[in-house]
Image: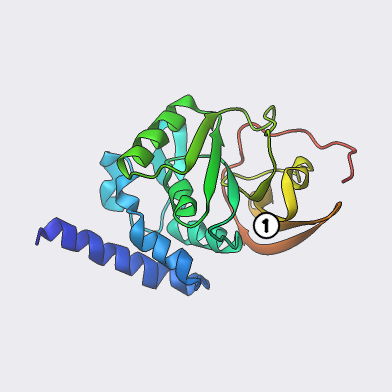
Amino acid sequence: MDTNLVDMEQARHWMINHQIRPWNVFEPDVLNAFDEIHREDFVPEAYRNLAFVDTEIPLPDNRRMLKPVLEGRLLQALELTDDVDVLVVGTGSGFFTALIASIARHVTAIDNSEELTNYAQTKLGLARISNVTLTTADFADWTPDKQFDRIVLTGGLAVFDERLPEWLTDGGIAIAPIGEAPSMNVERIARSGDNYTRTRLFETVVPELRDTVEPSDFRF
């Protein structure tokens, strides 16, 4: 067996069991996704040796790939099943989108960087992941043509965006980092009928989304 292949598998096993799992990520579907979707294939070649390290990895267009532990926590918080449609805001490398696609029915992912959209499209194609639709769009100006069962933001919002519950189906869940560094909270937004609840899950720090909307007086 190729030594490099063995090293990659060992590194993947270490990432899952010694980085992600200790962060209270225990759902089998989530851990299996990290085992099945090869993170190293989505990392820029220059940083391939850092694919399983607990660090953010530089991406094209001055972006960064989230740490594996944060990807794991976000993925678990989505409570995915194979019959949900998911919106990802901030496509990035395509890896996190691929993780979701390995569990969900379909994923729509938007990013305001055409360079990253093309990058992710190439990586997803090579991984033969077909249940994903990628779009280059500014989050602040974008309006979906459907509602989603799950929504997740891979970048932060300085303030809560009240469009999120509107975009959810009844019973849907959105996961979003909200606040400003160094004090940001990942929140769970759950819709029930014409109401929604917001629950703080854990603290983190992520780059803010580049294209966000100003707060309004709208109340759901």
Q: Secondary structure at mark 1?
A: strand
The relative height of residue 168 versus residue 27 in the rendered view (above or below) is above
User: Residue 180, can we see it?
Assistant: no
Q: How is the image coloured?
A: rainbow
Q: How many marks?
A: 1
The relative height of residue 44 versus residue 138 in the rendered view (above or below) is below
The relative height of residue 25 versus residue 109 in the rendered view (above or below) is below
Give whichever of 63, 151 is nearer the camera. Answer: 151
According to the picture, the residue beneath numbered tag 1 turns out to be 185
Residue 44 is drawn in which quadrant? top left
Residue 195 is drawn in which quadrant? bottom right
Residue 126 x/y as whole percent: 30, 40
Identity, as a three-letter code, of the amino acid under mark 1? Asn
| 11 with respect to 6 (left or right) | right
Q: Residues within 10 Å of mark 1 (few under 14, many from 20)?
A: many
Residue 10 x/y as whole percent: 24, 66
Give whichever of 139, 104 is nearer the camera. Answer: 104
| 173 with respect to 134 (left or right) | right
